[in-house]
Image (cartoon, rainbow, N blue to C red):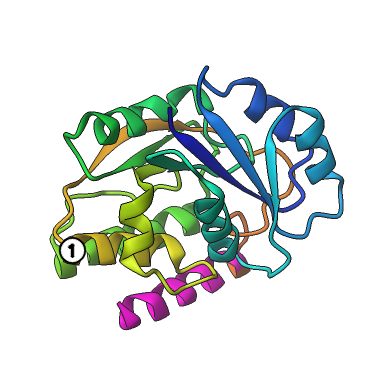
Amino acid sequence: MPDVVLPVLDEAEALPWVLGRMPAGYDPIVVDNGSTDGSADLARRLGARVVDEPRRGFGAACFAGLVAATADVVCFMDCDASLDPVEIPLVADPVAGGSADMVLGARCPEPGAWPLHARLGNRVLAAGLRRRAGVPVTDLGPMRAASREGLLGLGIEDRRFGWPLEMVLRAARAGWRITEVPVVYRARSGRSKVTGTLRGTVRTTRDMAAAARRS
């Protein structure tokens, strides 16, 4: 069964809900990226594998989880309760079954779950993917799945917020079959550190633009 990489930075509030809804057979790997709220210890008590990644950065945490994974298929998902782990098989099954090389979860937001500035920034990035790489996606979704060996072979360099975009660009240029499926997007638990703020959205967009130029 797939491994599920969960990058974590102060997500103690959301962890019980996220881990409690993990589908049977899916192995959560919590990558603690410098939490100060006890997230790592809580995840261990709840039975998750925990990897410590002291170098700050979303991509650094994702890469550490990818390296620690042992399953053939690896999934990635935000650990702030905005995405429901029950839906992970929607992205994992097509990869495991061989009908796709990468699957992204296209977010279908509940009311108030996705700030307008973040949604608009994501729309611009998705349009760029369609235009530059011919990737038929509408959302650069944070729930996604692909093969572990394939991802390691892509040579993704970004260790900040450009990681998700660089992953898809490199996969597209390698000829991967990339598709998306709809997933529910909920209001997150706790304070948003990234796209929930205008500053975070600008920083993320800047990192992704830099990743696009390198890829």
- The answer to whether residue 43 is left or right of residue 183 is right
Q: At x 82% / y 30%, what residue is drawn?
A: 45
Query: Where does the image place residue 187, in percent across and percent down from the top left?
Result: 59, 36
Question: Camera-side residue: 94 or 125?
Answer: 94
Query: Where does the image place residue 110, in percent across and percent down from the top left?
Result: 49, 31
- The answer to whether residue 104 is left or right of residue 80 is left
Question: Camera-side residue: 164 or 63?
Answer: 63
Q: At x 60% / y 66%, what residue is drawn?
A: 200
Q: Residue furthest top?
A: 24
- What kind of element bears circle 1? loop
Query: Where does the image place residue 29, in percent across and percent down from the top left?
Result: 61, 41
Q: At x 84% / y 41%, what residue is drawn?
A: 41
The amino acid at mark 1 is: Ala
Q: Is residue 140 visible?
A: no
Q: At x 69% / y 33%, what residue is drawn?
A: 48
The stretch of residues the image draws in magenta is: 200-215
- Magenta stretch: helix, strand or loop mostly: helix
Q: Is residue 210 visible?
A: yes
Q: Quadrant of residue 33?
A: bottom right
- The answer to whether residue 43 is left or right of residue 71 is right
Question: Camera-side residue: 67 or 166?
Answer: 67
Q: Quadrant of the N terminus?
A: top left
Q: Residue furthest front?
A: 70
Q: Which residue is mark 1?
A: 174
In reply to whether residue 207 is colored magenta, the answer given is yes
- The answer to whether residue 159 is left or right of residue 188 is left
Q: Quadrant of residue 203?
A: bottom right
